[in-house]
Image (spheres, rainbow, N blue to C red):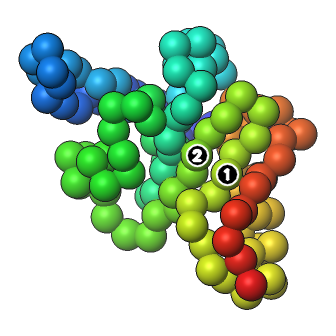
Amino acid sequence: MIDLMEKFMATIDVVTATGVSSVPVFVNPSPYEVNTLFAKSKHLRGLIAENQLYVWDAYHLNHVDVINNMAINGSKIELYLYPDYVELGTLNLPAKQLYELEEKIKNFSPLIRIYGHNFSINHPFNN
């Protein structure tokens, strides 16, 4: 299968106690890039928007930081990534819509590349 989605990395500057740091935001990351992030931090955040997967270290940036700094428009799905599963952001959807969203996410090519076909999705809030 050919995946034509663009892959790149951007950085967002954040102010820390010791100065300014550039935090990488991976777009359509490879499994190696995600595993490297997991080796540094067990808490990653992600976003699916505009048919792209964005992933970054959760200790340094939140979803709003990335959306605003990278000017991401349109519908978005907030993700929290862990070594063996993905958690959806706060969702309050009817069961049918939630199931459809889960199926869409489980078939999303960049996540399959990272996790393989057997990863779980947690959703803490639903009807």
Quadrant in which the C terminus appears: bottom right
Quadrant in which the N terminus appears: top right
Crowd rating for badge 1 (residues with CA inside 10 Å; few <14, some 14–19, many 20+): some
The residue carrying mark 2 is 80
Q: Residue furthest left?
A: 19
Residue 4 image offset from top left, x and y in percent: 56, 39
Amino acid type for the residue under numbered disc 2: Tyr
91 in relation to 37, above or below? below
Amino acid type for the residue under numbered disc 1: Glu
**Residue 49 seen in this snapshot:** yes
Q: Residue at x 55, y 32 (%)?
A: 43
The residue carrying mark 1 is 87
Q: Are marks 2 and 1 in contact (CB under 8 Å)?
A: yes
Q: Residue at x 63, y 80 (%)?
A: 92
Residue 67 image offset from top left, x and y in percent: 30, 54
Q: Is label 2 in a helix, a strand or a loop?
A: strand
